[in-house]
Image (cartoon, grey):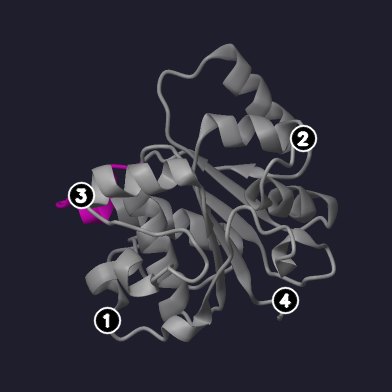
Amino acid sequence: MAASDLVVAFTGASGSPYGLRLVEVLLRAGRTVHLTISPAAVEVLETESGRTVALAPGAFDPAALLGARGNGLDLSQLRYHHFRDFRAGIASGSFLTGGMAICPCSLGTLAAVAHGVSENVIHRAADVHLKERRKLVLVPRETPLGLIALRNMVTVTEAGAVVLPAMPAFYTRPERIEDMVDFVVGRVCDQLGVAHGLVRRWGETGGE
């Protein structure tokens, strides 16, 4: 446990490539990642990324989750927590972290965070980050947005969270889907204070 540890949660919104890439980038940056995944996220992972993930603590396999992305990574730095395990360190404010990202963040998860409904350890960890005044980044992927979702976004923002919708930019002249994914992941990393070279920033002449 260290203040540089980061928490990442996958929930049941479209956008699993963002979450997978985020975990990869954080691990490559040498950060310890505490990962938790909702059952709905498992379905999205299989549909969008072809990954079959078992959530049971003894059955979870980080290599199955990351696939080729895991090549060369120190997977011992990926700490998995079952979404119902309220004994996990991330459920307590005494467990030090450098921030949390829910990526992707379903609107149901957004609503739970906005109203303090801690039905699972994802909601609880988010609540912990808000109460401890730590960085919490929510990455929703939904369109169009209804009034309830918009109000919930205002609520979590007022509580201290950062709402970072998965909206790729085009001034970077993306050539591949991966470039668009990297733009969003790079912005999440910026919020978490993790250095990266994923995108060319506005005003720069080059980038990775």
Q: Residue 194: percent from the left, percent from the top?
A: 53, 70
Rounded to the nearest whole Å, what is the CA distance between mark 1 and mark 2?
A: 40 Å
Label 1: few (<14), some (14–19) or many (≥20) C-alpha neighbours in 10 Å? few
Which label sits on residue 71? 1
Q: Residue 188: percent from the left, percent from the top?
A: 50, 55
Cβ–Cβ under 8 Å for marks 1 and 3: no
Label 3: few (<14), some (14–19) or many (≥20) C-alpha neighbours in 10 Å? few
Q: Is residue 168 left or right of residue 59?
A: left
**Residue that carries the numbered disc 4 in the rendered image:** 3
In this view, the residue in front, 196 or 177, is 177
Rounded to the nearest whole Å, what is the CA distance between mark 3 and mark 4?
A: 33 Å
Identify which residue is drawn at 57% across, 54% down: 101
Nearest to viewer (mark 1 / mark 2): 1
- Which badge, 1 or 4, is on the more N-terminal residue? 4
Identify which residue is drawn at 37% across, 60% down: 20
Q: Residue 205: percent from the left, percent from the top?
A: 29, 64
Identify which residue is drawn at 68% across, 34% down: 112
Secondary structure, mark 4, is: loop
**What is the chief secondary structure element of the magenta stretch?**
loop
Which label sits on residue 158? 2
- Figure quadrant of residue 115: top right
**Residue that carries the numbered disc 3 in the rendered image:** 177
The amino acid pointed to by label 1 is: Asn
